[in-house]
């Protein structure tokens, strides 16, 4: 199912359109994504205004134990991933209490600052959180438009 179809279906089913499944799972291997909340982002693609910060809240369940967690964020422009710097890479300082335990749910919370020097383009943000073994506890993608 395509992302837009999913969004429309959820809205039709009467669920609040503010708390949406506004992401694509890009290969979470040692965890399972439950919900993703990007705020403010009332509709897709998320309109990211230069100079502003957006909050990202990913709720996931871990299938492994891990001492560490490290976030990697990329902007995918025309299929090419470009590093997207975030202030705190350490997932254990982003709402997760480490060590991460097996079969436990966590809320990963971070901010996505949009620098004024970024070009006004459409791209896909790919956000990964890696465990001790460099595997993805989660990997999500969502479309954005920098304005
Ligand atoms: C993050 O999302 C979860 C699940 O929807 C929610 O329980 C939690 O309160 C949220 N945290 C913040 C800071 O919004």
Image (cartoon, rainbow, N blue to C red):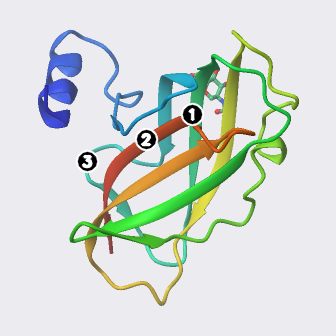
Sequence-first disc among 3 and 2 = 3
- Point out the frontmost of discs 1 and 2: 2
Disc 1: which residue: 58
- Judge: label 3 CB < 8 Å from ligand 1: no
Front-most of residues 101 and 23: 101
Residue 27: image quadrant is top left
Few, some or many C-alpha atoms within 10 Å of disc 3 (few <14, some 14-19, many ≥20)?
A: some
Q: Which residue is mark 3?
A: 44
Q: Residue at x 36, y 28 (%)?
A: 20
Where, quadrant-wise, is the C terminus in this rendering? bottom left
Q: Residues within 10 Å of mark 1 (few under 14, many from 20)?
A: many
Q: CA distance from mark 1 to mark 2?
A: 9 Å
The front one of 81 and 14 is 81
- The residue that mark 2 highlights is 140
Question: Considering only order in the chain, which callout, 1 or 3, is on the residue closer to the N terminus?
Answer: 3
Q: Are marks 1 and 2 in contact (CB under 8 Å)?
A: yes
- Nearer the camera: disc 3 or disc 2: 2
Viewer-side residue, 71 vs 7: 71
CA neighbours of label 2 inside 10 A, class few (<14), some (14 to 19), many (20+): many
- Classify 29 as above or below 79: above
**Which quarter is ligand 1 in?**
top right
């Amino acid at each position: 199912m395509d992302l837009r179809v999913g969004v429309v279906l959820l809205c039709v089913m009467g669920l609040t359109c503010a708390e949406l499944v506004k992401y694509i799972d890009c290969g979470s291997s040692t965890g399972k994504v439950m919900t993703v909340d990007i705020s403010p982002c009332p509709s897709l693609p998320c309109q990211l205004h230069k100079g502003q910060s957006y909050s990202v809240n990913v709720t996931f369940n871990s299938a492994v134990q891990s001492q560490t967690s490290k976030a990697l964020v990329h902007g995918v422009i025309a299929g090419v991933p470009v590093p997207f710097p975030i202030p705190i890479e350490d997932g254990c300082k982003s709402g997760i209490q480490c060590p991460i335990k097996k079969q436990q749910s966590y809320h990963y919370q971070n901010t996505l600052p949009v620098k004024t020097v970024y070009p006004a383009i459409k791209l896909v943000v790919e956000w990964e959180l890696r465990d001790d073994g460099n595997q993805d506890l989660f990997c999500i993608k969502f479309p954005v438009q920098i304005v």
